[in-house]
Image (cartoon, rainbow, N blue to C red):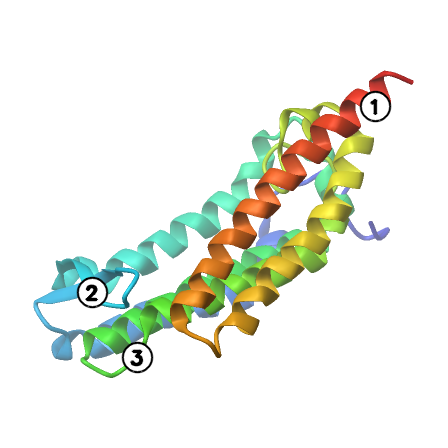
Amino acid sequence: MSASEPSTYRVDWQEARRDWPAWLALLASFVASLMLYPHLPEQVPIHWNLHGEADGFAGKFWGAIGLPLLNVGIYLMLLFLPLVDPKRANYPRFIRFYRGFRVFMAFFFAGLHGVTLYAALGRPIDVGLVVTLGVSLLFVYLGNSLGRIRHNYFVGIRTPWTLANEEVWRRTHRLGGRLFVLAGLLPWLAWPFSRAAALYALIGGSLVVVLVTTVYSAVLFQRINAR
């Protein structure tokens, strides 16, 4: 934490204005929807099955504005949620990551909205593959950042054991960071074989991350308490 940072997390103009790239991403989603709205079909695809085929649709209005509204909601949640965290005072210790995370998520969902609009216009695009690889990049980003996250109740690997002990939190996040990077790289390595291989690699990697970090934190907690 730099000397210029506050001693606890607060939401004010100084904090919010640092998120200007996120504001641009949010605004771009609404502008894109407004510009393309006359060209959208009456039913806009919003969900795709494992074969990359659209199997869920929304009306034209909600198909155009639903994801941008969700993006705004997620951004505001990330901005204000730390205010009710009992570990609120820890956020300045990883505030650079947390600000970057808010911006990253805004761009992630803005990109997802752009892909949805592109598909709705009838353009050829494998939405399922794009989403799979996009989530994989999110995993790599998180994996490279997990070690910076300090003890809190909303962001990070939150098991009963990491929340109960700061040493367990710290060591689990070091391990989890490596696992997240690996889980994020696997789909890119599997992609040349098939889109299904990339998806299964992402799902399998996610399950391994959850299982290993959960078991590791539980075992480590027991060992520390047995000292």
Q: The residue under label 3 is which amino acid type?
A: Ile
Neighbor class of circle 3 (other Cα within 10 Å; few <14, some 14-19, many 20+) is few
Q: Quadrant of residue 100?
A: bottom right
Q: Nearer the viewer, residue 53 or 56?
A: 53
Residue marked by disc 2: 54
Indicate which disc, 2 or 3, sits on the residue closer to the N terminus: 2
Q: Which mark is residue 48?
A: none
Residue at 50% in and 60% down:
201
Q: Position of residue 172 (x, y in %)?
A: 74, 40
x, y percent for residue 13 = 58, 53
Q: CA distance from mark 3 to mark 1?
A: 50 Å
Q: Nearer the viewer, mark 2 or mark 1?
A: 1
Q: Which residue is mark 1?
A: 223
Q: Amino acid at mark 2?
A: Ala
Residue 125 - label = 3
- The residue mark sitting in front, 3 or 1, is 1
Whether residues under marks 2 and 1 lie with C-beta atoms below 8 angstroms apart, the answer is no
The numbered mark, 2 or 1, whose residue comes first in the sequence reads 2
